[in-house]
């Protein structure tokens, strides 16, 4: 009797003898061990279902791989698939495990994996960074949520990035792109995909770094329009300290020393990871002392963490002040510009903003008196521009002052208003120290 092999013809025509016939039975190829034709018969209708299979044994367990339905794939294609499975066995690999892994990976959608990513990354991220990342991944990349991780391609990312640029602007598109790239890098490390589809996509061309700073008139309007609530107090403190938004928004009571009149922001909350000591003017102290004490660690906000109502509060405030195209970070740039205008030495102004690239690490605490004096001068300037016809306080000696030993920068910056250029006669000026 000749050896029976699976061919296109035999796969369609083979019949078991009556005594061999069962509802589910396999006829194996005599020349290719493990390669077989599986015939399942519906006992009610007598209808047959024929599939090509590859069966093998790992230890004491028999495993079976489907190589395609007869009529859907050819016998040659099924044989080739079986040969690939057999080759893996030679290399001590289990084809069934590989297929199960592929199915598991395919079941991971982008949306579900984003939830896992955010949960894993939140403890290591600053609140503002987490909020931004969450917004970009959950809102801007929502059209990708239904796709499996493996199926997302460069074309998907590029097309959606263009939509984001059109609807939200090019800077937002680039930040969303960066968030998605970080997400896929994490997913690769978790074994959920093999490639980062963001790699190779084009970044949107932006107009360069933002250079907006507020005019004296705008700063005056914003400061005086601040509401008597957390958002208003935060904005005023940003104006008086030059701190970053979240450095004040996530401020904790333990970081304030009312006796020393300072805020000490730990490196875990600063952009450059260096501790930042912020001298407080009298006005800044008064604002902090007026904040209602709540049973929580954070000075501002409600619930868990620091202040979080940024977008809503900014929109409401913009409707009140009617100043176009400004952001909270513009206040920080305004403070730095203002310090320079007042004659504050560049390295002191940089120290006020915790820009330590110009200051050696071992020298970072040497400018605390100068920082205090600089912020006092800036507070005087704010008081002047909010007066009816106030005059900015200059951080230089008054021309014609008495001769003698040159006073220190700190002493010169904190001269009383009578020693500085006075305002016009009869004009009162509010003190914002």
Image: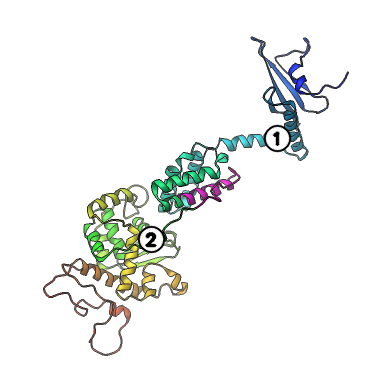
Q: Which residue is mark 2?
A: 210
Position of 168 relative to 63 (above/below):
below
* SS for dot 2: loop
Position of 138 relative to 210 (above/below):
above
Look at 31% across and 86% down and name the residue there. Answer: 406
Residue 105 lies in the magenta-colored region = no
Of marks 1 and 2, which one's residue comes earlier in the chain?
1
* Residue 287, picture quadrant: bottom left
Instruction: Report the coloring of the rendering.
Output: rainbow
Q: Which mark is residue 407?
A: none
Q: Is residue 242 visible?
A: no
Determine the CA span between mark 1 and mark 2: 55 Å
Q: Residue furthest left?
A: 426
* Residue 283, picture quadrant: bottom left
The N terminus sits in image quarter: top right
Residue 20 placement, left or right of 396? right
Residue 185 lies in the magenta-colored region = yes
Look at 32% across and 82% down and name the residue there. Answer: 408
Q: Which residue is mark 1?
A: 95
Extent of the magenta region: 176-202
The crowding category of the residue bearing disc 2, from other C-alpha atoms within 10 Å (few below 14, some 14 to 19, many at least 20), is few
Residue 83 placement, left or right of 185? right
- Depth order, front residue of 101/304: 101
Q: How many marks?
A: 2
């Amino acid at each position: 009797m000749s050896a029976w092999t699976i061919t296109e013809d035999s796969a369609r025509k083979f019949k078991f003898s009556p005594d061999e016939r069962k509802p589910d039975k396999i006829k194996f190829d005599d020349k290719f061990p493990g390669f077989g034709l599986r015939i399942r018969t519906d006992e009610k209708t007598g209808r047959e279902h024929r599939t090509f299979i590859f069966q093998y044994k790992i230890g004491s367990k028999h495993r079976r791989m489907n190589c395609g339905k007869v009529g859907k794939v050819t016998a040659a294609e099924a044989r080739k698939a079986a040969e690939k499975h057999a080759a893996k066995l030679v290399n001590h690999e289990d084809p069934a495990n590989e297929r199960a892994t592929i199915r598991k990976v395919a079941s991971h959608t982008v949306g579900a994996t984003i939830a896992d990513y955010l949960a894993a990354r939140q403890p290591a991220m600053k609140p503002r960074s987490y909020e931004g990342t969450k917004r970009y991944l959950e809102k801007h990349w929502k059209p990708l949520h239904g796709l499996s991780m493996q199926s997302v391609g460069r074309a998907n990312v590029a097309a959606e990035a263009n939509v984001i640029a059109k609807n939200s602007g090019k800077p937002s598109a680039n930040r969303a792109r960066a968030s998605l790239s970080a997400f896929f890098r994490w997913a690769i490390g978790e074994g959920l995909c093999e490639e980062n589809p963001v790699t190779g996509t084009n970044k949107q061309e932006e107009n360069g770094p933002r250079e907006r700073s507020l005019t004296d008139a705008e700063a005056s309007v914003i400061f005086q329009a601040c509401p008597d609530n957390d958002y208003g107090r935060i904005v005023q403190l940003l104006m008086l300290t030059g701190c970053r938004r979240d450095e004040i928004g996530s401020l904790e009571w333990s970081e304030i020393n009312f006796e020393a009149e300072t805020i000490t922001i730990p490196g875990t909350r600063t952009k450059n990871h260096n501790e930042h000591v912020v001298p407080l003017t009298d006005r800044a102290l008064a604002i902090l002392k007026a904040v209602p004490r709540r049973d929580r660690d954070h000075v501002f906000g409600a619930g868990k963490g620091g202040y979080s109502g940024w977008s809503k509060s900014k929109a409401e405030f913009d409707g009140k002040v009617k100043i176009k195209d400004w952001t909270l970070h513009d206040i920080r740039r305004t403070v730095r510009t203002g310090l320079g205008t007042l004659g504050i030495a560049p390295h002191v102004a940089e120290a006020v903003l915790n820009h330590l690239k110009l200051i050696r690490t071992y020298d970072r605490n040497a400018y605390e008196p100068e920082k205090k004096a600089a912020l006092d001068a800036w507070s005087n300037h704010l008081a002047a521009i909010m007066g009816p016809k106030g005059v900015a306080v200059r951080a230089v000696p008054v021309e014609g002052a008495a001769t003698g030993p040159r006073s220190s920068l700190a002493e010169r910056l904190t001269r009383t208003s009578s020693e500085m250029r006075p305002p016009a006669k009869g004009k009162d000026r509010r003190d914002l120290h």
